[in-house]
């Protein structure tokens, strides 16, 4: 996992700790049971920080049930006889529970914070709960570093849901609906996610130089993201930087040889160079991976036809 994000999350956790001796929480532990809360949000970065305790906590937080309807983990697997076994790295939701409460939700009747909590309108979560926005930024960058297993990227927001107060989430949402958003002025030290959104938006605008620059920034910190490498290669190709495009695509295939798009892009590049056999091979590989895409098959056939034409032209004329 990314050490600096892990460290930054722990710094955030520490900043949220109540001063020693001021933990006025009761001992009921209701909020550490599946029946005590209806749901509990936890991000992948927080699960990574929990280490070995992460997977079971994720099942508990999801309130996973068996076939008979009973909870897989009726109480948090981190709860021991002395209380929370992962107290120093317990997730954010455990930290803010009881202190902040969205309107329309209630605390358990036995909770010592009942009547003393800060109530906020649910849509104001990121404004009202200290540290929520920071957790979101860190978790989003963590998600961006994760390598998609298949040919398409996972949710770029990391399953965090959209926060439409956030300009980057708003922009992402608009791009998803086919609009071109205005973005804030570029700032040094912007999050990786901001660079990712800038790359997407520039790509949609056909600003290939900008798109390439932002993808390069993302890739400098996420060198395993073969899918983004494929997009970076596309923009390099559009700029006429054939060698750079080829390098991106070949590296993308070294990392993940299962994306038909990358194979087809190389097919186009070798067609452009009139390296017809290579073009046919790459289009053929793309078609094998995605037989439902007739264009790859068609391009392969065209490349093979070029090879036949070339060999005919090279044949010596018979006397
Ligand atoms: S991680 Fe700790 S504080 Fe959070 S629910 Fe589990 S036992 Fe309770
Ligand atoms: S329900 Fe309230 S009092 Fe009980 S452990 Fe949770 S935060 Fe503390």
Image (cartoon, rainbow, N blue to C red):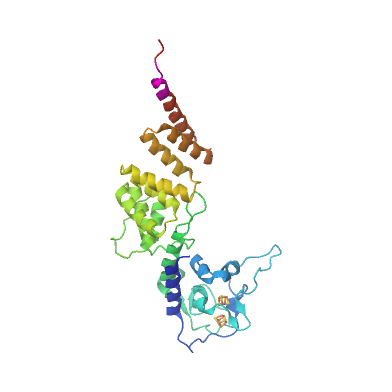
The residue positioned 47% from the left and 88% from the top of the image is 20
Image quadrant of ligand 2 equals bottom right
Q: In the drawing, does residue 221 fall left or right of residue 60?
A: left
**Residue 67 placed where, x, y %?**
70, 62
Give above or below for 79 relative to 290. Answer: below
Residue 167 x/y as whole percent: 36, 62
Side (left or right) of 284 relative to 218: right
Extreme residue toward the top, this view: 319
Q: Does the magenta stretch include residue 315?
A: yes
Tell me: 137 left or right of 73: left
For this rendering, which residue is in front, 104 or 2?
Answer: 2
Q: Which residue is drawn at 52% across and 50% down?
A: 150
User: The magenta stretch spans which residues?
Assistant: 309-316
Q: From this viewpoint, is residue 307 visible?
A: yes
Instruction: Place residue 224 in its image quadrant.
Output: bottom left
* Residue 123 in sight here: no
């Amino acid at each position: 996992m990314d050490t600096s994000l892990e460290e930054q999350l722990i710094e955030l956790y520490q900043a949220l700790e109540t001063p020693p001796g001021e933990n006025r929480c009761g001992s009921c532990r209701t909020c550490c049971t599946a029946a005590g809360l209806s749901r509990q949000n936890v991000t992948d970065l927080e699960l990574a920080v929990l280490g070995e305790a992460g997977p079971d906590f994720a099942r508990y937080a999801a309130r996973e049930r068996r076939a008979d309807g009973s909870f897989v983990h009726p109480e948090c697997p981190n709860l021991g006889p002395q209380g929370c076994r992962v107290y120093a790295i317990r997730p954010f939701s455990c930290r803010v529970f009881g202190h902040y409460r969205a309107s329309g939700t209630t605390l358990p009747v036995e909770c010592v914070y009942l009547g003393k909590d800060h109530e906020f309108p649910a849509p104001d979560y990121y404004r009202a709960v200290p540290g929520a926005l920071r957790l979101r930024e860190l978790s989003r960058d963590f998600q961006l570093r994760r390598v998609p297993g298949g040919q398409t990227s996972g949710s770029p927001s990391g399953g965090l849901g959209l926060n439409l107060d956030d300009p980057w989430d708003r922009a992402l949402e608009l791009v998803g609906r086919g609009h071109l958003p205005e973005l804030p002025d570029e700032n040094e030290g912007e999050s990786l996610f901001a660079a990712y959104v800038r790359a997407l938006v520039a790509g949609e605008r056909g600003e290939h130089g900008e798109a390439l620059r932002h993808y390069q920034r993302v890739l400098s910190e996420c060198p395993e993201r073969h899918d983004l490498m494929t997009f970076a290669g596309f923009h390099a190709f559009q700029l006429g930087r054939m060698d750079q495009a080829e390098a991106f695509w070949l590296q993308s295939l070294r990392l993940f040889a299962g994306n038909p798009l990358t194979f087809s892009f190389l097919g186009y590049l070798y067609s452009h160079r009139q390296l017809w056999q290579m073009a046919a091979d790459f289009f053929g590989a793309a078609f094998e991976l995605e037989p439902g895409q007739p264009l790859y098959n068609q391009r392969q056939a065209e490349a093979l036809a070029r090879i036949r034409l070339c060999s005919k032209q090279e044949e010596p004329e018979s006397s």
